Amino acid sequence: MPVAIALFEGERLVAAAPAYLKNGSEGEFVFDWSWADLAHKMGLRYYPKLVVAVPFTPATGDRLLVAPGLDRARTAATFVRVAQELARENLISGAHVLFPREEEARGWENAGMMRRAGVQFHWHNRGYKTWDDYLSTFTSKRRNQLKRESSQPAKEGVTIETVPQRAIDAGLADTMHALYATTVDKFRWGRRYLNARFFRLVAERFTDRLAWVVAKKDGRVVAGAFNVKKGDRLYGRYWGGHVDLPFLHFNVCYYHGIREAIDGGLTTFEPGAGGEHKKARGFEPTTTHSAHWLRDPKLSSIVGEFLSRERAAVEAFVRGDGADPDDI
């Protein structure tokens, strides 16, 4: 259920945090199912919980919206107090802020929440002017691997392109939804969070941000990715394919986006959550953040100890001297 925590000065809205009351943890990408399981074993109700996030979107951004001139740290502290009061009055287990910027995450932490660290793999433009500039940063063995993978679609008669915004319409939206559905339907844990109407509304109202990618063979769309461009960053999201061809996923979801970022002078390409295989293709481990407050003191203490170990593991992994934090 959507809610909003808002702060007013008189009748003037000066800060807001769009949020949701949730009875599950689907679509969040900051996984807390083990916390819910622990709460159940302790005889506690973990749901409903209050979540400040952009639904189904593991991309970092502002979560607390503050009017110019307002002190963000003090505002965060106010919001935490309000969230705690709401939780106690309405038997909500806790509050969670997902994928804020690091500065904001530390503000939530200073206001009394527990900070969590995660890992995504992002590509950063190190001043590359061409695709060959980028390839030159790899060892000879790895460079030959990337050349082989990136040239494979052409050998299969497949072309890959970013659809011009003027060509994005309801028909393409239906095509992209069908591709999205092919992926989520393949897996037992897959969920069709997004329906065809969502894709049509995005195509209608959000066209100026869309950088949808399609792969075609014999004139027919066989694969695609739901990419979004904002400022100097490219964001990769839902992928799908109707055919199984070697390295098609890597090209649609990674190599094409890198080429586009280089050609467009973009600084960063965030291809989505998960996937250590991205590291071998030039994506660097990058720390993501979230903030959490749990109403039950004992549960909070146990989770807090875990988060301390997890943050240390994430920091070591990002530095390059630690194992995958998912293994702790």
Image (cartoon, rainbow, N blue to C red):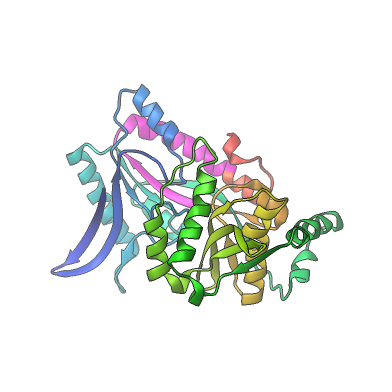
Q: Is residue 62 above or below residue 95?
A: below
Along the line of sight, which residue is nearer the eye, 120 or 26? 26
Q: Residue at x 56, y 70 (%)?
A: 163
Screen quadrant of the C terminus: top right
Q: Is residue 101 magenta?
A: no
Q: Is residue 297 magenta?
A: yes
Q: Position of residue 101 (x, y in %)?
A: 45, 59
Q: Is residue 143 above or below residue 39?
A: below
Left or right for 89, reference 289: left
Judge whether residue 184 can be spotted in this image. yes
Q: Position of residue 180 (x, y in %)?
A: 51, 52
Left or right for 148, reference 258: right
Left or right for 279, reference 269: right
Residue 216: name its quadrant: bottom right
Residue 137: name its quadrant: bottom right
Q: Position of residue 302 (x, y in %)?
A: 42, 31
Q: Is residue 40 above or below residue 31?
A: above
Q: Main secondary structure of the magenta part?
A: helix
Q: Position of residue 264 (x, y in %)?
A: 61, 76
Left or right for 15, reference 131: left
Q: Which residues are magenta?
A: 289-313
